[in-house]
Amino acid sequence: MRHVIIIGSGPAGYTAAIYAARANLSPLVIASSVEFGGELMKTTEVENFPGFPDGIMGPDLMTRMQQQAEKFGAEIVYDDVVSLELDGPVKAVTLGNGDRHEAHAVIYATGSAYRKLGLPDEDRLSGYGVSWCATCDGAFFRQKTVAVIGGGDSAMEEATFLTRFVDKVYLIHRSENFRASAAMIDRAKADEKIEFIMNARVDQILGADLVSGIGIVDTVTGEQRVLDVQGVFVAIGADPRTHLVHGLLELTEQGTIAVDGRSSRTSLPGVFAAGDVVDPTYKQAITAAGSGTVAALDAQHYLETVHDASRTAATASA
Amino acid sequence: MSTRDVTDATFEAEVLKNEKTIMVDFWAEWCGPCRAVSPILDAIAAEHPDKLEIVKLDVDANPETAMKYQITSIPAMKVFRGGEVVKTVIGAKPKPALEADLAEFLA
C-alpha cells in the first residue's frame, strides 16, 4: 500500500509529487498515457513562470518538473485512470492496463479539457481543418488563411504562433473585452497578419472533406457573413476534468471540485484536489503549482494524523 | 522494436503496393502528442505482428505524401489496404481507445 497516489502530471501534479517525495511519502504519479505533462506540453514559450527571465518552452518546463519529482523518489506511471474508489480509509485507483494501486491518500490534479464550440460539423471536421493545438497543426497551414476563436491568453498565443506559417489569421471573439493579458493582446494587435473581429460568434463550420470557411454572426447587429478559411483553431477555454469523480466528490456550481476554504481538502477525507480542476478563475501554471504544494502539505498532515490514530489504537488494544 | 520509417520515395512500394494491411503514422519531431502516441503504436504493432504492420512517415521530411493525403493534424494514422485508405484515426489516444478504433484490423 502506498502513502499517496497523485493523479495528473501538469504543474499541480508534479509540484505535489516534488513536495510529497521530499516528505518521504514516495508518491506514485499517474501521468496519463498521452496527455502527460498537461496543457503546457502543447504550448511554446512560457514567459511568465518565475525563475525563467528568458522564458522556457512549455514541454521543457514540464520535463524539468518531472525530473525534479523523480529525483526525490516519485514513481511515474504513464497510464490512464479508469476507475476510482475514494471512500473509506483505503483508496484504490485502477488503470487502463488493469493494474490496481492502493493508497491512504489521493491527490486529484487532472486539470481541464478543451471546450468545444458545440457546432454540428465540428467533430466531423476535427483533424480536417478544425484544431485545438496550433503548435501541433499550425505547420500544415502554410500560406493559408485561418481563424482563431477565443479571447484569452491561449487564443492570443495561438494567433501569434500561427503567423509563422499562415498568410492571415482572423481572431474572432464574441465580445469586446478580453480575458487575455495586456502583453499578449498588444503583441497580437501589433502583428499585421492578425485581423481582430470582435463581437462575433461562429455559428457554422463549412467544408465537405476539409474546412473551407466559417459562418459568423455579429452579436450587435445580427449581420451574418462567411469567412473563407482553411483552418479553425478553437481556444475558447477549458472545463475541469471531473468525469471520474462524478458522484464521488462534491463539485461547485462552476463544475470544479469543491475544496474546504483555502485548503485542498475535498468532501472525502484523504482525498485532495489541486490545479485547474479546483480553479475556475486563475488557471495559470504557477497557481496550479502552488495549489499542488497545498495538496501535498494537506496530504502529509492527513497521513500523519491517520498514522498517529492507528498507533494510538494499537497501543490501546495492546 | 520500433516501427520503421517510410518516405516519399518508398511510400508507393512499401505502403500502396503492400499486399498486407498496413498503417501509416504521420508524425513530426515537434509534435508532442506524436511522441506520446509513438510507444503505444509500437506496442500495438508488437502485439499483433501478423495482423497489422505499422510504419511511420515524418511529415517534415516527406511533404509530398503528407500533402497528397491532406494531412492537417498530427498524429494522423491511416490504415491502407490494396493502396486505399480504409481507416483514419486522428489524435493521440490511450491504448485501449486506439485498439477499439483499430479493432477490425487487429482481430
Image: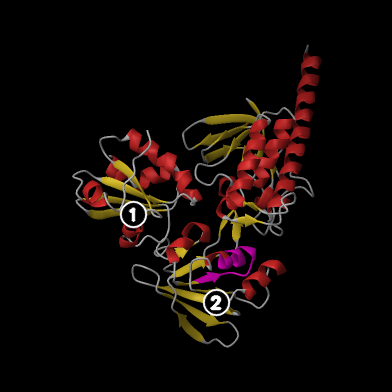
Query: Residue A192 lies in magenta, yes or no?
Result: no
* C-alpha span from label 1 to label 2: 31 Å
Residue A201 circle label: 2
Report the quarter where the N terminus of chain A lies: top right
How many marks overall?
2
The residue that appears at 77% across and 47% down in the rendered structure is: A260
Residue A102 x %, y %: 60, 29
Answer with left or right where residue A149 lies relative to residue A274.
left
Highlighted range, magenta: A147-160
Neighbour tally class for label 2: few under 14, some 14-19, many 20 plus, Cα within 10 Å: many
* Residue A80 visible, this angle: yes
In this view, the residue in front, B20 or A29, is B20
Q: Is residue A55 left or right of residue A170?
A: right
Nearest the eye: A235 or B13: B13
Q: Position of residue A6 (x, y in %)?
A: 64, 38
In the picture, the quarter occupied by the C terminus of chain A is top right
Kind of residue indicated by mark 2:
Arg
| Residue name at image x 58 percent, y 34 percent | A76
Q: Nearer the viewer, residue A215 or A186?
A: A186
Disc on res. B88: 1
| Residue at point 76%, 38% (across, down) | A298
Q: Residue at x 27, y 45 (%)?
A: B22
In the rendered image of this protein, does residue B97 appear above or below residue A114? above
Please state the horizontal and vertical placement of residue A265, each as a whole percent of the image.
74, 43
Whether residue A181 appears in this view of the structure is: no
Residue at mark 1: chain: B
The residue mark sitting in front, 1 or 2, is: 1
